[in-house]
């Protein structure tokens, strides 16, 4: 179980909720400690050469960012550092993201933005760019290998996704107070849930995933108590996920 502030690359509800390949991860227990656990952990902010992608690469990135509202400092495509290059990564690039988040919850949010951008880019790079991405790197937070979102066309609409998400949370006795969407390619819901019983809410969602088998680019979940204080936050896209839970709450392992 996870107690205290925690950033984890394998949370109880991971991107398995988005693609069948990640379904196994959704059954794993959350990781303990203040850390970022990633497919390939890196902390080399600023290490990549200053070269950028092609005009088509930059055009695709611009289109993705136009569908999102973030407070990221910068998002750029860079060449892979020499030591990361291999035949398997031939022709691939690095997505370098700069964040100024300082709180655990803020870091979860900005890591979600980074993975959402990277997976949406890789979903479209074969058709709309000259290069795909092999790795993403986020200043002060972490990074790792990156794949695709797992979303399949036809994508769900805002109305249908909102209705499904509200119904699934209601089945757990939880009230969704707001839903908004990022739109990097497929939609990515950002959901806020209010509950007067944080421990009960965390226990309920550790046993089942309200986002499973939705054709979305990712999801972001905030849970607040009756006073509006945050007690749980999670973000996922593709095979990447991160999360934080208020110190003192107990997280049950998922069978």
Image (spheres, rainbow, N blue to C red):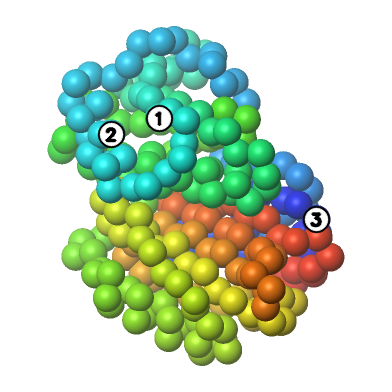
**On screen, residue 196 above or below 252:** below
Query: Element at badge 3?
Result: loop
Q: Which mark is residue 75?
A: 1
- x%, y% of residue 41? 61, 33
Q: Which mark is residue 187?
A: none
Name the residue that disc number 3 marks. 4
Q: Is residue 230 visible?
A: yes
Q: Is residue 142 visible?
A: no
Image quadrant in which you'd find residue 163:
bottom left
Q: Quadrant of the N terminus?
A: bottom right
Q: Is residue 21 left or right of residue 187?
A: right
Image quadrant in which you'd find residue 21:
bottom left
Pick the residue in front: 123 or 4.
Answer: 4
Name the residue that disc number 2 marks. 61
**On screen, residue 243 above or below 158:** above
Query: Element at badge 1?
Result: strand
Q: Would you call the spot at circle 2 few (<14 residues within 10 Å), some (14-19), or many (20 or more)?
A: many
Task: Looking at the image, tell me whether mark 3 or mark 2 is earlier in sequence order.
Answer: 3
Separation (CA) of disc 2 from disc 1: 9 Å
Q: Quadrant of the C terminus?
A: bottom right
């Amino acid at each position: 179980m996870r107690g205290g502030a925690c950033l984890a690359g394998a949370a109880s509800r991971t991107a398995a909720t988005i693609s069948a390949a990640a379904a196994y991860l959704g059954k794993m227990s959350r990781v303990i400690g203040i850390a970022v656990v990633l497919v390939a952990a890196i902390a080399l902010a600023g290490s990549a050469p200053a070269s950028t992608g092609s005009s088509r690469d930059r055009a695709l990135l611009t289109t993705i960012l136009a569908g999102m509202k973030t407070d990221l400092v910068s998002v750029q495509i860079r060449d892979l550092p020499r030591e990361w290059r291999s035949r398997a990564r031939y022709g691939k690039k690095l997505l370098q993201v700069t964040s100024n988040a300082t709180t655990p919850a803020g870091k979860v949010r900005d890591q979600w933005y980074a993975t959402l951008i990277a997976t949406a880019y890789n979903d479209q790079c074969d058709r709309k760019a000259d290069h795909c991405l092999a790795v993403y790197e986020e200043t002060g937070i972490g990074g790792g290998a990156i794949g695709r979102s797992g979303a399949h066309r036809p994508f769900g609409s805002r109305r249908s996704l909102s209705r499904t998400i509200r119904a699934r949370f209601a089945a757990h006795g939880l009230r969704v107070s707001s839903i908004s969407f990022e739109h990097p390619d497929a939609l990515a819901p950002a959901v806020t849930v209010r509950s007067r019983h944080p421990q009960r809410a965390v226990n309920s969602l550790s046993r089942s995933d309200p986002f499973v088998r939705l054709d979305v680019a990712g999801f972001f979940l905030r849970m607040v108590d009756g006073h509006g204080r945050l007690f749980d936050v999670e973000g996922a896209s593709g095979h990447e996920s991160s999360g934080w839970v208020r110190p003192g709450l107990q997280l049950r392992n998922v069978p």
